[in-house]
């Protein structure tokens, strides 16, 4: 995968520009920054954000090592922290914030803070309708008093999480009003950081921004399609996908009419065909079609596309090629017949864009994922470590990257 750090910088600036004055920017980098590499992403964005948000303490340790002066918020209910651990050191420096979810957890964290000799910053999660973590407003009010009375705990923040921010502004507004009504009566400390908006609420309207937003989808550029009801600020439409996934054609075959390709013989050549093999399969995270696609949804098979680089120096571009047959563990087959004449050596060694960074392309991540009923996040998170991540430095060509060189394959003439 290629991760475009210039696009990342653009997205962070665009998000910052959408926020109302004084609102802080929290950036979610959980699940290894959605498979894009949390350490490298956190290190690059550290000076551009106010807080990094993760799920568990293992993730907090990774991003802290990469961005040692940026505060980190862990969302998972944490119950124990070992003395002498990196988390202990972060607490001593005030750089680790933990989420408070219920009375039992808060009591355990108070004990841990005493044993470690620290004052522990907590962000209290108020459940206003998602029904996942946190506690209901009545319990949250009691926890405010409990935390504020403790010498070892600090109520550094309070937050909620919207259930339908991408689909319903009405439902999201209801949750916002519940949260703000709770805040109005909860006797919070003056410096308590309020936050509720993940990407879709953040790009809708500044009334959801509060003191901080927590964006993940936005910085990856995958929110380009906006909310399902069409409500978003203009700047959200300028976000750029930060990643693409490239491979190459490792073999080209000339097949006569009637030849089948792949397990189950799901694709059969109707004419003399040129078929390329690409070393990417489901073990690399390339999604399989649903088992019923052949009989119930045959159109899906016709929509799976990659883009192949054609031409020679001075005249190159990207041409679409269908993915044909079943996806194998380590390879896919693509139909090069229509574009073979434009490919040197009929396409052998040609670059293949498996997932495009062009949001209008048929193989953009959101479209590839939607064919299998996935979210684009799922596609990203399921691409394993064996698929190398390459980081393009800002304003540098594809062959030059921040960490290591990309292998430039020259097409045989």
Image: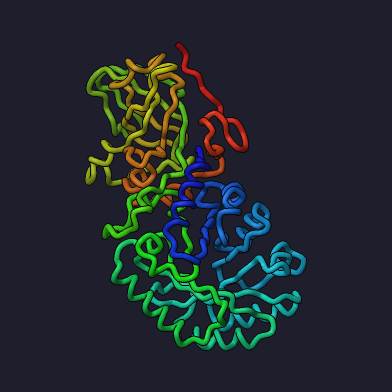
Judged left or right of residue 279, residue 121 is right
What residue appears at the point 29 percent right and 60 percent down from the top-left corner? 231
Nearer to us in this view, 216 or 367: 216
Identify the image quadrant of residue 121: bottom right
Q: How is the image coloured?
A: rainbow
Furthest-front residue in this view: 21
Judged left or right of residue 118, residue 107 is left
What residue appears at the point 60 percent right and 47 percent down from the top-left corner? 40
Nearer to us in this view, 339 or 157: 157
Q: Residue 324, image x and y in percent? A: 32, 32
User: Which quadrant, please, contains the C terminus?
Assistant: top left
Q: Relative to 344, is 54 above or below?
A: below
Judged left or right of residue 214, residue 254 is left
Furthest-top residue in this view: 413
Q: How many marks?
A: 0
Identify the image quadrant of residue 78: bottom right
Q: Relative to 160, is 347 above or below?
A: above
Residue 290 visible to the viewer? no
Q: Residue 55, image x and y in percent? A: 55, 63
Q: Residue 3, image x and y in percent? A: 51, 41
Q: Residue 139, image x and y in percent? A: 49, 86
Residue 286 visible to the viewer? yes
Identify the image quadrant of residue 338: top left
Q: Relative to 112, is 9 above or below?
A: above
Judged left or right of residue 282, residue 341 is left
What residue appears at the point 53 percent right and 88 percent down from the top-left corner? 142
């Amino acid at each position: 995968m290629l991760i475009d750090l210039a696009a990342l910088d653009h997205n962070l600036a665009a998000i910052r520009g959408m926020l109302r004055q004084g609102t802080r920017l929290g950036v979610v980098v959980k699940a290894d920054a959605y498979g894009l590499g949390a350490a490298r992403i956190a290190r690059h964005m550290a000076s551009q954000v106010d807080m990094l948000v993760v799920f568990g303490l293992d993730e907090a340790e990774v991003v802290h090592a990469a961005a040692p002066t940026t505060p980190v918020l862990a969302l998972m209910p944490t119950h124990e922290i070992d003395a002498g651990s990196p988390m202990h050191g972060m607490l001593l420096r005030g750089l680790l914030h933990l989420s408070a979810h219920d009375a039992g957890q808060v009591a355990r964290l108070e004990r841990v803070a005493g044993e470690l000799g620290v004052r522990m910053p907590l962000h209290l999660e108020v459940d206003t309708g998602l029904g996942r973590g946190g506690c209901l407003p009545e319990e949250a009010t009691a926890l405010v008093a409990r935390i504020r009375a403790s010498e070892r705990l600090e109520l550094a923040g309070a937050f909620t999480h919207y259930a339908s921010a991408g689909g319903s502004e009405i439902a999201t507004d209801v949750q916002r009003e519940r949260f703000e009504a709770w805040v109005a009566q909860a006797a919070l400390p003056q410096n308590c950081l309020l936050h509720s908006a993940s990407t879709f609420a953040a790009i809708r309207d500044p009334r959801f921004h509060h003191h901080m937003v927590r964006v993940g989808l936005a910085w990856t550029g995958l929110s380009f399609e906006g909310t399902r009801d069409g409500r978003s600020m203009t700047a959200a439409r300028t976000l750029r996908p930060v990643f693409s996934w490239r491979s190459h054609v490792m073999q080209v075959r000339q097949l006569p009419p009637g030849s089948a390709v792949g397990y189950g013989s799901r694709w059969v050549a109707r004419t003399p065909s040129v078929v390329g093999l690409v070393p990417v399969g489901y073990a690399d995270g390339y999604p399989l079609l649903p088992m019923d696609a052949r009989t119930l949804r045959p159109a899906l098979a016709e929509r799976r596309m990659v883009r192949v680089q054609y031409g020679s120096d001075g005249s190159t571009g990207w041409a679409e090629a269908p993915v044909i047959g079943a996806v194998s563990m380590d390879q896919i087959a693509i139909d090069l017949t229509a574009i073979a004449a434009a490919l040197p050596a009929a396409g052998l060694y040609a670059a293949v864009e498996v997932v495009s960074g062009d949001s209008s392309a048929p193989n953009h991540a959101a479209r590839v994922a939607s064919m299998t009923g996935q979210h684009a996040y799922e596609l990203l998170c399921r691409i394993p470590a064996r698929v190398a991540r390459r980081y393009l430095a800002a304003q540098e060509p594809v062959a030059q990257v921040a960490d290591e060189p990309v292998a430039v394959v020259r097409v045989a003439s």
